[in-house]
Image: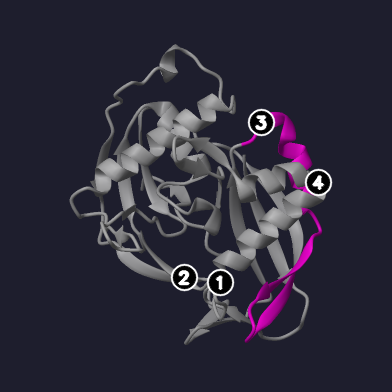
Amino acid sequence: MRIRLSFNTLKQGVNTIPVNYQYPISAWIYQTLAKGDRELSTFLHDSGFKVGAKSFKFFTFSQLNFPAKGFKVEGDRLHILAGHCSLTVSFLLPQAMENFIKGLFNNQRFGIGDKKSQADLLVASVEILAEPVFNGQATFTTASPIMVGRRVENCKSAAYLKPDEPGFEQLLADNLIHKFTAALNYSLIKPGPELEMEDPEITFKLLNNPRMWGITVKAFTAEETKIKGYTFDFALKAPTPLLKMGYICGFGEKNSLGMGCVEVKKER
């Protein structure tokens, strides 16, 4: 399920938020889900859908989208000039829950910010978006940075890989397979002959120069951490269920922090 949330700012004039707005939006999504199903929200936040040592939340979201000249960045602040913006949020949920989720977000008000600045937003509309048809290959463009990390021995932080570095393709593929396995184990998707993929063929092709994005999580707190991802276009050949998994749940890691959201790139 994918929805587009359209926001209006509640204060006239310029509204200022941190450029690192991903964590506040993620927290607001959990809080909104809790209003309708506290058990689901708590499960996603505290546990998630597990396979082995890995855990997945099965939702992601895009960067904020603004109209032309609708925002300005100065240092670590983002000034909203247009008075409105939008956000795409994507969940792996049963179809029967679509109207329930749509109703949860409609007319919600929330503050987005940190200790330095904050803006109050109102959800003006919620639109359920149609899912593309996949046929074993697709071309994507990132709607938020994709993060792929590799653990380094005797190092607390991961090594973040660029899309053109050795190992990126394999880690991206493994992540997709793990998500698929977890979704199957929790009956979020139905098994079938086309889903029996012990060793699926997955081919990744980078289509342009990647741009690095550094993101600070929980800024100005004791838990502050920094993560890094990349925005780029790419072509992916894979079994259709895996393409759908990446589109709905996000590619790479930290999807619930607004990483790895993609759009299908339209052919010119």
Badge 4 marks a residue whose secondary structure is helix
Tell me whether the residue at label 3 lies in contact with that at label 2, contact meaning CB atoms closer than 8 angstroms: no
Identity, as a three-letter code, of the amino acid under mark 3: Pro
Residue depicted at x 73% and y 57%: 31
- Which residue is the site of mark 4? 36
Residue stretch in magenta:
93-121
Q: Which residue occupies the extreme left position in the image?
A: 166
Badge 3 marks a residue whose secondary structure is loop
Q: Which part of the image, by quadrant, shows the N terminus?
A: top right
From this view, report whether residue 215 is shown above or below residue 130.
Answer: below
Q: Residues within 10 Å of mark 2 (few under 14, many from 20)?
A: few
Closest to the observer, 125 or 69: 125
**Chain-order first, disc 3 or disc 2:** 3
Left or right position of 208 against 132:
left
- Which residue is the site of mark 1? 218
- Which residue is the site of mark 2? 225
The CA distance from mark 2 to mark 1 is: 7 Å
> Does residue 86 show up?
no
- In front of the other: label 2 or label 4? 2
Tell me whether the residue at label 3 lies in contact with that at label 4, contact meaning CB atoms closer than 8 angstroms: no
In the rendering, at what x and y percent does residue 7 appear? 70, 65
